[in-house]
C-alpha cells in the first residue's frame, strides 16, 4: 500500500480456468507531481502493448478490468525461479563480482564493507534495457525483473512510464553508450513500422498525444545512434531503492 499504486494479489477466472493475477485499481493510485492522476493503470497496459509489439514478451499478459475496487489493471502473476543459484543482478561484494558482469555503481554497507551494484551480461536483460529506453521507464528496480522457471525474464511495474520528459531510471546501465545488438536494431525498425500501422492508435487510448508521439521520437533516436542510451548527469538515473 506504500507504493505509487495499491498492488493487490487477486484471482482471475475465464470459464473453468483460474489464475492468480496482480490487480492495481485506479482508485488506489497515489497522486504524483509529474504524472496525471488516474493514469497509471493505463500506462501499465500501454507497456504491455509495447512489449507485444517488440515480440520479446517482456511484460506479462495485462488487461484493463473492473474489479472489487473499481477499474484497474490486471496482470498475470508470474512465479519466479527461486531455486536458481544464479542471480541476474544485485549488490555483490566488490571482490566477488561474477566474471563478465557489468558494474553500475559502488556502495558500502552499514559496516563499511565495499559492494558493487552490477548485473549479468545477459541478452535478456539487454532487451529489457532497450524496452525501458523506448517506454522511458522511470522505475526499473532490480525487484521489477523476474526470471521464471522456464528461463524467461519479465519486467513488471510500469506505472510510471511514457512521460514526455526524459525520466529513464534503471539499474540496467551496464551497456550505456555501447552499440545495440543487431536483433535490437531489427526490433526497433519493426516498431517504427508498427507505430504507423496501429501501435500509435492503440497507445492513444491510454496516453496523451504528446506521450504517444515521444514513443516514435525515442525509437527513431535509438535507430539513429544505434547505441544504448547513457545516463543524464543532471538528474538521478538510478531508482531508489535500486533493488
Image: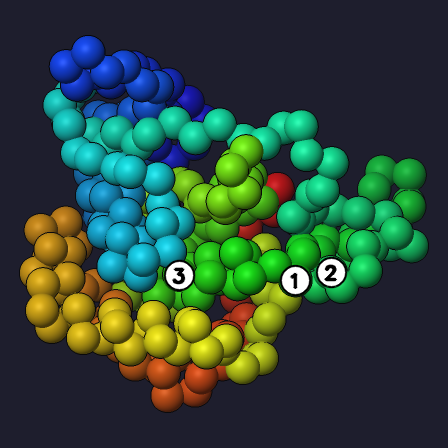
Q: Is residue 231 left or right of residue 30?
A: right
The residue lying at 35 percent from left, 39 percent from top is: 60
Number of the front mark, 3 or 1: 1
The residue lying at 91 percent from left, 46 percent from top is: 113
Picture disc at residue 101: 2
Mark 1 sits on what residue? Answer: 121
- Provide residue 211's location: percent of width, then percent of height: 21, 63
- Which quadrant, please, contains the C terminus? top right
Q: Secondary structure under badge 3? A: helix
Tell me which label, 2 or 3, sits earlier in the chain: 2
The residue lying at 35 percent from left, 66 percent from top is: 134
Q: Is residue 129 left or right of residue 185?
A: right
* CB atoms of marks 1 and 2 within 8 Å: yes
Q: Residue furthest bottom?
A: 224
Task: Say which of 197 and 156 sits in front.
Answer: 197
- Provide residue 92's location: percent of width, then percent of height: 80, 47
Q: Quadrant of residue 26?
A: top left
Task: Say which of 84 and 167 sits in front.
Answer: 84
Q: Quadrant of residue 186?
A: bottom left
* CB atoms of marks 3 and 1 within 8 Å: no
The answer to whether any part of residue 32 appears in the image is no
Mark 3 sits on what residue? Answer: 131
- Provide residue 209's location: percent of width, then percent of height: 12, 64
Amino acid at each position: 500500500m506504500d507504493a505509487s499504486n495499491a498492488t493487490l494479489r487477486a484471482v482471475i477466472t475465464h470459464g473453468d480456468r483460474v489464475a492468480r493475477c496482480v490487480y492495481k485499481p485506479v482508485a488506489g493510485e497515489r497522486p504524483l507531481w509529474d504524472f496525471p492522476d488516474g493514469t497509471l493503470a493505463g500506462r501499465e497496459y500501454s507497456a504491455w502493448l509495447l512489449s507485444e509489439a517488440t515480440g520479446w514478451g517482456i511484460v506479462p499478459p495485462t488487461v484493463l478490468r473492473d474489479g472489487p475496487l473499481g477499474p484497474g489493471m490486471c496482470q498475470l502473476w508470474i512465479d519466479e525461479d527461486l531455486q536458481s543459484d544464479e542471480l541476474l543482478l544485485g549488490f555483490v561484494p566488490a571482490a566477488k563480482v561474477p566474471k563478465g558482469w557489468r558494474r553500475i555503481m559502488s556502495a558500502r554497507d552499514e559496516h563499511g564493507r565495499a559492494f558493487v551494484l552490477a548485473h549479468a551480461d545477459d541478452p535478456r536483460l539487454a532487451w529489457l534495457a532497450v524496452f525501458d529506453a523506448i517506454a522511458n521507464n522511470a522505475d526499473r528496480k532490480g525487484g521489477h525483473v523476474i526470471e521464471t522457471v522456464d528461463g524467461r525474464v519479465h519486467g513488471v511495474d510500469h506505472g510510471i512510464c511514457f512521460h514526455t520528459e526524459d525520466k529513464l531510471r534503471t539499474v540496467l546501465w551496464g551497456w550505456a553508450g555501447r552499440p545495440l545488438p543487431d536483433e535490437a536494431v531489427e526490433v526497433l525498425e519493426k516498431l517504427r513500422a508498427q507505430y504507423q500501422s496501429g501501435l500509435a492508435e492503440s497507445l492513444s487510448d491510454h496516453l496523451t498525444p504528446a506521450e504517444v508521439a515521444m514513443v516514435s521520437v525515442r525509437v527513431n533516436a535509438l535507430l539513429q545512434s544505434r547505441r544504448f542510451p547513457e545516463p543524464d548527469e543532471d538528474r538521478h538515473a538510478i531508482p531508489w531503492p535500486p533493488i
